[in-house]
Every structure is written in C-alpha cells, then in structure tokens.
Image (cartoon, grey):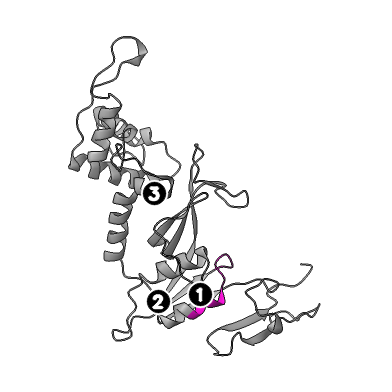
Amino acid sequence: MEGTNAYAEAKGAEKPTRGGVGYRRPWKKVTDGEMQVLFALLIYIEAKRGCGSNSFWKEEGLNAVHFQAKNLKRFSQIKRYLHISDPALQLSQSEWFQKLEPVSRMLQSCSQQYYLLATNVTGDEMMIRFSGRSHHIYRMPSKPITEGYKVLALCDISYTYRWIFASRSNSFSGLILQEDLTPTGSTVFQLASSLPYSSSLGLHFNIYIDNYFVSQALLVKLRALGIGACETARVNGSAFPPDLHDSRKNIPWNEVSGGPANMEGKVLALQWQDMLRGS
C-alpha cells in the first residue's frame, strides 16, 4: 500500500491533466482494503484464463462480477501504479528481488501456514511470462512459456508451497550456497529444508526432481535431513555412475539394471529402457 501511494505521488498522479485526450482522474491514496480486493481480483481473473479483465465488469456472461463501471476505473488506476517496495530505495543489481520481497515473503508464509502437504512433493522450474526489458528474464525456446522470469518452486500437485526467484544475470534470490552443491542443487536443498519433516510426528517427505538439478551429493544431503529424493539423470551425464551404465545397443524394453552409486549405499542408480527404440 505504502509503495503504491509513494509511486503514484512520484509520478504526479495526484494532479489531473487538463484538456485533450490526456485527461485523467486525480489519484486518491489507496487503502489497505482496496489492496486486498485488488489482489483477490487479480487471482480470480488469472484463474479464469482466456477472458480480458474488462469483461469481468460486464452485466452479462458467465464471468460477470457485476461491479459498477467506476470500480473498473479504480481497479485499472491502482493496477497502473501498483508498486510493492518503496520506489525511493536504491537497490543494487544483487538486490533485484527486493522489489517483490515484502509480498513474496507474506505469500510464502501463508502458503506454508494454510496447506497440508502430501508425502510426495516436486521441485521444478516455473516460468512467469514477461516480454519487457529486464536483465533477469530467461529465453527458453523449448518451454511452453518461451520468455519470462524463472522461479524454482516446491509444489504439491498444482499447489506452490515455496519458491526462490532466479535471475539470468544475478543467480538466485536469497540463496544460501552449500559448499558441496551447485547453485541449482543448493536451491533444492534450501526449498526442501522448509518442509515440516519430523520423525517423532511421523511426517516424512519424498521430493521428485528432474535432471536439471541432478547430483549425488544433493541426494545424500537430503537423506541426512530425513527426506527421500528421486531424480532423473542421463546415463551419459556426469551424475550417473559410469560403472553402472549398461552400454548394450539393444536393451530389452523395461529391463532394469544398476546398483548402489556410492560406497555408503545411500544413493541407488537404476537404468532402464522405457520405450522401444525406433518407435
């Protein structure tokens, strides 16, 4: 609320323009209640994908919310000057994520407070569509969303439990780098550390991740926390033990091979042919 009001004031929104097509209504300071309604509407509109935001104020249609026209104008006005942090703050490139941190911290706290996780959870990348100018966006042509901000998240089915922002130029937000892990492995470890695991209460978790995060050291560290983990790996990659690699040209379909990946037996590496070659 404070950031939005300060940003609107810095942009001169309190003074209406006069004459011509540039006329706009003067800005009234946004209240805490209006901000709550704004975020509720943004979540509702996002859940009803495929409809323009203006259509939600029409009197007809399945998505109508039956608001008055002036509320649409107020919604658009607040959204135009929406600002999370104090615009007067001079943030360095390494503090880029602080622009969203007040709301991100609050949302993550609520996500962990009001949801009971299942035993099996997932760690994966998420893309937030954005095509503007930014040093932090990723361009990934092979993904459904080819351009935008990247988030590494801990999820349960379609529920996002916790997340860490990623930047193309400044690594990850608030990351505590582990000595024996890569930055991506450290993000999984940091996210998994927030799980409410407890052997005394019978709360156990298994986290599933793909080959983007693969590392034997990560699996060992997660197991030390009491968290099981399963991840995919390419047999010709550095993470899969070469001595366990079945290099036969014609491996029978669904045949499993492998064994312990280290001397302690804390990591099990398995290889199988999950599809017929040439099909």
User: Which image quadrant for residue 108?
Assistant: bottom left
Q: Secondary structure at mark 1?
A: helix
The residue under label 3 is 95
Q: Is disc 3 in contact with disc 1, using a CB cutoff of under 8 Å?
A: no
Q: Position of residue 212 (x, y in %)?
A: 57, 64
Which residue is at the far bottom?
Answer: 264
Viewer-nearest residue: 55 or 144: 144
The residue under label 1 is 218
Q: Is residue 67 above or below residue 257?
A: above
Q: Quadrant of the C terminus?
A: bottom right
Viewer-nearest residue: 141 or 135: 135
At label 1, the amino acid type is Leu
Residue range corresponding to the magenta coloring = 210-220
| Magenta-span inclusion, residue 213 | yes
Indicate which disc residue 275 carries: none
Q: Is residue 108 above or below residue 276?
A: above
Sequence-wise first label, 2 or 3: 3
Nearer mark to the viewer, of 3 and 1: 3
Sequence-wise first label, 3 or 1: 3
Q: How dense is the environment of label 1, judged by Cα within 10 Å: few (below 14), some, or many (20 and up)?
A: many
Q: Position of residue 261 (x, y in %)?
A: 61, 84
Nearer mark to the viewer, of 1 and 2: 1
Q: How dense is the environment of label 3, judged by Cα within 10 Å: few (below 14), some, or many (20 and up)?
A: few
Q: Secondary structure at mark 2?
A: loop
Q: Position of residue 219 (x, y in %)?
A: 51, 77
**Is residue 218 rendered to the left or right of residue 159?**
right
Nearer mark to the viewer, of 2 and 3: 3
The residue under label 2 is 119
Q: Is residue 135 above or below residue 16?
A: below
Sequence-wise first label, 1 or 2: 2
Q: Residue at x 34, y 78 (%)?
A: 197
